[in-house]
Amino acid sequence: MTRLISGNHARLRSVVASLISHPPRVYVVKVLMIFRPLLLILALTLSVTTACGAKAGSGAVDYSVSAQKNYEKGLKQLDEKDWIAASKYFAFIKSRFPYSKYAVLAELRLADAEFGAEQYLEAIDSFRLFLKFHPTHEMVANGYVSFKIGDAYMRQLSGDFWLFPPSYEKDQSSTEDAANELKSFLDKYPDSPYRDKAKDILVKVGKRLADHEWYVARYYWDRGKPMGTVLRLRRLLERYRGVGYDVEALWLLGRAYVAVDMPDRARLSWQELVAKYPTSNRAGEAKDALGSLAPVKR
């Protein structure tokens, strides 16, 4: 670490001298680009050892004289989940070999290290910066960077813990961000090798959002607010079909339509239930409910 910091002192002095006449924004961005790898190493050193599920590793490094060798050592540490050591190698490359092709790759792998260490917000920021400054890079073109952004959004979502309300009762803004990123990835990269993984993650995200819609729909129903139930169930059925709520949602939607005096729409909901899910436990109830509705006016 000492060698890495001292190596940056000379670079910092030259950069500061050249930036005195530049706008403040340029100064800040360039200084951050120099010290971001160092800040990452410090953050990982403080947090990786206590991060749930993350392997700390020893953090020991043995630098080589070439950018390629250091890059290969960094990749090896990524494979071994020693995020601190990996970050040190990649930061060293950026410091000592700033014009090498491996310096660009090191930026990407620093983001991978943040991701591996479960520093997902930081990883999202780093992947976005890579996407912005290297839009033609092969790891951007094949969808890898965009996929990792969506994956990071998903992984940062909180899980359930018995002391706290279940996740479906909470605000779902972050879950919607994850869904939007993954959908954007699938739209932009139709040939990406990461599409199948993205689709699997998107199913999980959709289930989580559907859980929330069902919870809110039931909340309104139990409190005598059927129109709120109608709106939530329509949204659930429009966006999250096939995740496990279709039968119950159609059944309750029909009941909610009856409660707001919209029998024709109730009929359509129950007819769809009977037609698509004839063997479900609600099909018989839906048939009985259809029989109780007033005949359609001619």
Image: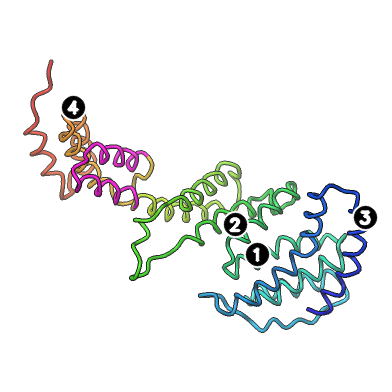
Between residues 169 and 28, which one lies in front from this camera angle?
28
Label 1 belongs to which residue?
112
Question: SS of the residue at dot 2?
Answer: helix
- Main SS of the magenta part reads helix
Residue 193, given in percent of the width and then of the height, sits at 59, 53
At 24% from the left edge and 48% from the top edge, which residue is drawn? Answer: 218
Identify the amino acid type marked 1.
Asp
Residue 7, given in percent of the width and then of the height, sits at 87, 73
Residue 296, given in percent of the width and then of the height, sits at 12, 22
The residue segment tinted magenta is 212-238
In primary-sequence order, the first of circles 3 and 1 is: 3
* 3D distance between C-alphas at marks 3 and 1: 32 Å
Question: SS of the residue at dot 4?
Answer: helix
Label 2 belongs to which residue?
148
Which mark identifies residue 18? 3
- Nearer mark to the viewer, of 3 and 1: 3
* 3D distance between C-alphas at marks 2 and 1: 9 Å
Identify the amino acid type marked 3.
Ser
Label 4 belongs to which residue?
264
Count neighbours of disc 3 (C-alpha within 10 A) and say few if under 14, some if 14 to 19, many if 20 or more. few
Which mark identifies residue 101? none
Q: Which quadrant would residue 230 be assigned to in this image?
A: top left
* 3D distance between C-alphas at marks 2 and 3: 35 Å
Question: SS of the residue at dot 1?
Answer: helix
Give yes or no for contact between labels 2 and 1 (Cβ–Cβ under 8 Å): yes
In primary-sequence order, the first of circles 2 and 1 is: 1
Lateral position of residue 216 relative to residue 117, left or right: left
Identify the amino acid type marked 2.
Lys
* 3D distance between C-alphas at marks 4 and 3: 74 Å
Kindly give the residue lying farthest to the top in the view shown. Answer: 298
